[in-house]
Image: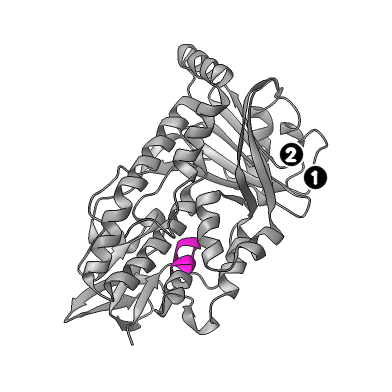
Amino acid sequence: MVRIAIIGGGIGGLTAALALKEFGFEAEIYEQAPALLDVGAAIALWPNALRVLELLGLAKAIREHAGEMDEIRWLDQRGALLNRVSIAPSVALHRADLQATLLHALPPSSIRLEHALKAYDYGKDKIVAHFTHGEEIEADFLIGADGIHSQVRSQVLGDGEPVYRGYTVWRGISSVAPGSISSATAIEIHGRGRRFGIGPVGNSRIGWWASANSRSVEAASESRTELLRLFAGWCAPVIELIAATPPEHILTTRAFDRDPNRTWGKARVTLLGDAIHPTTPNLGQGGCLAMEDAMVLARCFEKYGATEEALRKYEGRRQQRTAAITRYSRLYGRLGQSENPFARGAKKFFLSLAPESILQRLVQTVCDYDATTVMV
């Protein structure tokens, strides 16, 4: 039997194991954490990710935990509507609910916790993975799904740390659902060097995110105080949502990405998700792209067999798509975070006057990809 080792038990790693299983290949996941407990933040699943979940038979279960979205609205910080666009049905949900759904669809024996990768060696038609606690395993293939600070990537590419893009991002989930929020709507509010996003995440909860230009990250215990200061005077329900979220449940990160790289793997090793194409969160595509990767990789194994050719075909099929999304997201973030009055005026002018058909085409460019049918 072909032995496939996946390093990392996040959304990309779990989806890869499920997709490989769907096409007749068994994989084992090696996760460094002692338990798979995701952080208290929301994740959006756009149509491109839902297509993957449909094929895996999990879309219905996901929808039971999620909030539906069929429209995006852009507002200024006073609450004035800049524009809106209808979108194909999408959902947002607590990341823990998504992870639990993926996890429960896999055999418990396929996940090995407390396995932090130290290094790997190339053997004869094998990969030997060495873990920090001293264990070694042999695998026919190694898939690095170990996130933005990937240990697998460091050995494949050795290209240093990801690039900070100049702003901090906060995420939270509020159990308070203000009446001023429209149902089934994702909202993005723009101000000078700051943005605030809102969306339903199921079970009468509201997910939100905020971003502000920053050189440093506030300590988690201070996040709510800092946010209340940064967004004082903004339209409802910004302050209400921040105030209703316990400080310890606010996740603080910085916006990082990397320039696209044409090398994704070597021999019987490859990468997926944030390990190879970390993307700023502006388009909500990080997890979605990882799911796409997982499905295309599994389909390449099905078509080309358990071979190095399958890995190289997967990499070739994914490079252009992921590079484009990374660049679009970086540009959108640069415009969204701009403090330059001319850039802000141009952004507001475009958002206010762009016909819905143009906005829909831009959304479709990101979300219409179908990893279940794209040519491999």
Q: Is residue 11 magenta?
A: yes
Position of 108 relative to 85 (above/below): below
Across and down, in percent, residue 120 comes to 26, 73
Start-end of magenta stretch: 10-16
Residue farthest toward the bottom in the current orientation of the protein = 1
Left or right of 125? Residue 40 is right
At x 59%, y 42%, the residue is 170
Give the crowd class for mark 1: few <14, some 14-19, many >=20 residues within 10 Å. some
At x 36%, y 64%, the residue is 297
Across and down, in percent, residue 257 comes to 38, 43
The three-letter code of the residue at mark 1 reads Val
Across and down, in percent, residue 341 comes to 49, 12
Position of 90 relative to 145 (above/below): above
Residue designated by label 1: 176
Question: Does the residue at mark 2 contact the one at mark 1 (Cβ under 8 Å)?
Answer: yes
Position of 353 relative to 179 (above/below): above
Give the structural element (helix, strand or loop) at label 1: loop
* Along the viewing direction, whichever of 146 and 46 lies nearer the viewer: 46
